[in-house]
């Protein structure tokens, strides 16, 4: 999958191979079916995992980062790691991980990469040999041909060492927020150029495969995390951004959140007129509940809620009811092959293209160009398929920053604009997972990824709390997140439980906040922790409540995602299990925490010391630069944010249209 490029010395490569083969070793078992014996006998090296990891490092890391990784390998080589027997290697890995936070992070990342490829890497026929043993079928249908699913958004071809485009508006980022503004402004007669870091991929590219899906459609190949590994960050990076990979759970911005945001400077957002912005999005995305159906995981969630007397509701989703097909929906976190998902690729970006907007993909905005305190354009780097790059200048007097809440502040910081609040107040809706193992198969890859939720605990900490939702099951992500004691037990656990797993998830409204800063290479670096006492309480409480729901729904086993295994089995003392959850460590890399909702890092507000953009969406300190994505949120909304991001962007677009049009300047 990754191009095999040699960046490690032979010794380091040998050590890497031994580490991978400790996480996923070859184990001889005498009994059981052939498919299981083969699974246990297969090591990471048998699937070429170490070479894949080396190829990925070569593609994605700076030379000094590869060297730092090499030094971690050297530390193992000093003990002749590659020459040790499996039990000694397992023991040494645990010792190194326990030796300090950086070593723990390094070992966890290596483990994650090993399992990403061991359970995600397809062979030529599109199948991974480990799937048979864990009961996973892999893809259930092939993508349509490019003729059957043509790409209908024309792309600008940028070539040569440098190129220039000129327009009225440059929208940077084509996700939930940027796409709405691109469509609205182009329809209003402004000439729009959209720059998108990811590529243009549609139904014909969506293979229902976890590994290529993550590498091709997610920011950082789906492997992004905070600086210390405290949280895994999932965000889309493709034409359409997060809307192409997300779970289509559509929720209107709650009224109390609108009142809070109005008090912080977004005037009128709490008034009835604002409903028109939400309605416009709701309608264009075809949001409905008639096509919502519950898979087995969601049926368990609903059963648990009913047993405990908790409220629950069926979700409204942005899907085309005419082509909805639950048999393939479970794979749509790697893109919807049927084209049912009404992502912005199929809605607002198409509208923008039809009205004449121009699109450049593979284009990373490096910085915003400023003259005399106002925007005059964007400097970008376009990377072509063969690896060559073109420097692109877009001359435009208006720039919309919509790169998502990790990359938007990085763009402003690289440009030296936005004031002291840039990158601060990052909200992540931290998510915990607790999985139930049921007697009957759940097959969590079948059916809609999200179809129901409970808001029983939405206000368990005053105005903060968490929603209870559920997610699908996919082999590599599951293997990467679950605890690992040794290679044999990890394989056993996956083989025994994967088909029977129903993962419930909590989505918390952050009380504390994180931040985005720049690293030495001008790249975004996320800092976040569960240090805030309210966030820590909510996180632990959520795991306890998810466990109670699993039990109420009839789970035979309940698995937490602490890295030290913490599992309840039928017959065990349940109260003792809950007490152990409450005692669990929330330090970085001791428990799996996820975010699929990044928000607030370039927030709107009335105070320039504490916010980046004014109540209309334009930067306090730089005319012509507007914030158009989830980073504009003043605080976390506490609900899945796509609809809120798009409605706020719709309002910002109206504010931009009401602002007199500037002439396109040349950039000096
Ligand atoms: C797996 C998953 C499931 C989710 N499920 C739901 C759900 O069910 N309901 C819901 O409401 N929300 C859901 N979300 C969240 C929702 O999709 C996001 O909050 C939303 O897409 C964010 O919108 P945005 O405009 O802020 O940024 P994004 O949609 O992330 O778009 C930002 C775009 O900017 C591009 N970009 C980044 N840097 C640059 C640069 N320097 N130059 C040019 N382009 C750049 C990126 O490639 C990306 O395409 C989910 C997210 C994920 C990842």
Image (cartoon, rainbow, N blue to C red):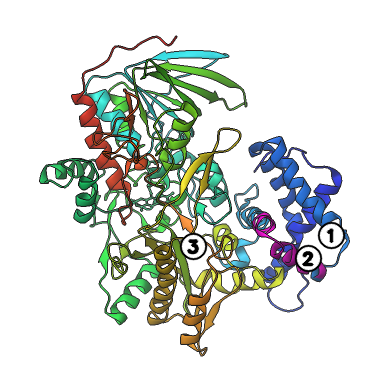
- Nearer-the-camera pick, 200 or 234: 234
Element at badge 1?
helix
Residue occupied by mark 1: 81
Name the residue at 86% across, 60% down: 79
Where's residue 291, x and y in %? Answer: 27, 56
Where's residue 286, x and y in %? Answer: 24, 46
- Nearer-the-camera pick, 625 or 394: 625
Labels 1 and 2 touching (C-beta < 8 A): yes
Q: Earlier in the sequence, mark 1 or mark 2?
A: 1
Mark 3 vs mark 2: in front: 2
Q: Is residue 351 left or right of residue 160?
A: left
Element at badge 2?
helix
Eyeballing the image, is 111 above or below 235?
A: below
Residue occupied by mark 3: 473
Which quadrant of the rendered structure holds the C terminus?
A: top left
Eyeballing the image, is 203 above or below 472?
A: above
Where's residue 576, x and y in %? Answer: 50, 86
Whether disc 3's CB lies below 8 Å from ligand 1 is answered: no
- Nearer-the-camera pick, 241 or 138: 241
Residue 448 seen from this side: yes
Identity of the residue furthest to the left in this view:
272
Where's residue 351, x and y in %? Answer: 28, 30
Residue occupied by mark 2: 92
- Nearer-the-camera pick, 158 or 66: 66
Q: Earlier in the sequence, mark 3 or mark 2?
A: 2
Residue range of the region highlighted in magenta in the rendering: 88-108
């Amino acid at each position: 999958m990754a191009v095999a490029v040699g960046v490690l010395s032979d010794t380091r490569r040998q050590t890497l191979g031994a580490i991978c083969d400790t996480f996923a070793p070859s184990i001889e078992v005498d009994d059981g079916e052939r498919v299981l014996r083969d699974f246990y006998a297969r090591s990471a090296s048998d699937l070429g995992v170490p070479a894949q990891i080396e190829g990925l490092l070569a593609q994605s890391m700076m030379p000094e980062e590869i060297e730092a990784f090499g030094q971690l390998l050297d530390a193992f080589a000093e003990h002749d790691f590659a020459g040790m027997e499996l039990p000694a290697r397992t023991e040494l890995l645990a010792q190194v991980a326990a030796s300090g936070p950086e070593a723990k992070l390094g070992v966890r990342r290596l483990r994650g990469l090993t399992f990403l490829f061991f359970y995600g890497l397809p062979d030529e026929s599109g199948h991974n040999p480990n799937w048979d043993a864990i009961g996973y079928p892999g893809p259930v249908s092939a993508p349509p041909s490019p003729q059957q699913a043509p790409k209908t958004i024309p792309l600008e071809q940028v070539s040569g060492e440098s190129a220039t485009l000129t327009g009225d508006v440059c929208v940077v980022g084509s996700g939930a927020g940027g796409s709405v503004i691109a469509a609205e402004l182009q329809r209003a007669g402004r000439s729009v150029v959209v720059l998108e870091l990811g590529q243009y991929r549609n139904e014909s590219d969506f293979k229902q495969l976890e590994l290529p899906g993550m590498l091709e459609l997610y920011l950082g190949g789906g492997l992004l995390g905070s600086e210390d590994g405290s949280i895994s960050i999932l965000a889309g990076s493709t034409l359409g951004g997060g809307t192409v990979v997300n779970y289509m759970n559509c929720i209107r911005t709650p009224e109390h959140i609108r009142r809070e945001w109005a008090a912080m400077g977004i005037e009128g957002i709490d008034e009835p007129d604002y409903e028109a912005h939400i309605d416009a999005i709701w309608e264009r995305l075809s949001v409905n509940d008639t096509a919502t159906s519950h898979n087995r995981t969601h049926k368990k969630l609903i059963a648990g809620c009913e047993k405990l007397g908790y409220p629950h509701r069926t979700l409204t989703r942005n899907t085309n009811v005419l082509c909805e097909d639950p048999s393939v929906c479970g794979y749509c976190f790697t893109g919807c092959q049927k084209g049912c998902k009404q992502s912005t690729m199929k809605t607002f970006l198409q509208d923008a293209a039809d009205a004449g907007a121009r699109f450049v993909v593979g284009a990373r905005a490096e910085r915003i160009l400023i003259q005399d305190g106002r925007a005059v354009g964007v400097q970008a780097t376009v990377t072509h398929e063969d690896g060559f790059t073109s420097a692109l200048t877009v001359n435009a007097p208006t720039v919309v920053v919509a790169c998502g809440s990790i990359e938007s502040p990085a763009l402003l910081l690289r440009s030296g604009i936005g004031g002291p609040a840039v990158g601060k107040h990052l909200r992540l809706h931290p998510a915990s997972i607790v999985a139930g193992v049921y007697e009957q198969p759940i097959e969590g890859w079948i059916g809609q990824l999200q179809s129901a939720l409970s808001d029983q605990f939405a206000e368990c900490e005053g105005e903060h709390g968490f929603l209870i939702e559920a997610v699908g099951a996919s082999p590599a992500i599951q293997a990467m997140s679950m605890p690992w004691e040794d290679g044999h037990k990890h394989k056993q656990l996956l083989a025994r439980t994967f088909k029977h797993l129903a993962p419930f998830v909590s989505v918390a409204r952050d009380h504390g906040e994180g931040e985005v800063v720049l690293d030495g290479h001008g790249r975004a670096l996320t800092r976040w922790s569960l240090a805030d006492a309210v966030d820590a309480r909510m996180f632990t409480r959520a795991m306890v409540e998810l466990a109670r729901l699993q039990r109420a729904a009839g789970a035979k086993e309940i698995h937490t995602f602490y890295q030290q295994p913490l599992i309840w089995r039928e017959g065990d003392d349940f109260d003792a299990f809950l007490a152990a959850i409450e005692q669990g460590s929330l330090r970085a890399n001791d428990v799996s925490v996820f975010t699929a909702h990044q928000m607030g890092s370039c927030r709107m507000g009335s105070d320039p010391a504490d916010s980046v953009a004014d109540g209309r969406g334009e930067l306090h300190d730089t005319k012509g630069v507007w914030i158009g994505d989830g980073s504009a949120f003043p605080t976390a909304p506490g609900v899945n944010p796509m609809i809120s991001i798009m409605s706020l962007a719709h309002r910002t677009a109206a504010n931009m249209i009401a602002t007199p049009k500037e002439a396109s300047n040349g950039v000096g």
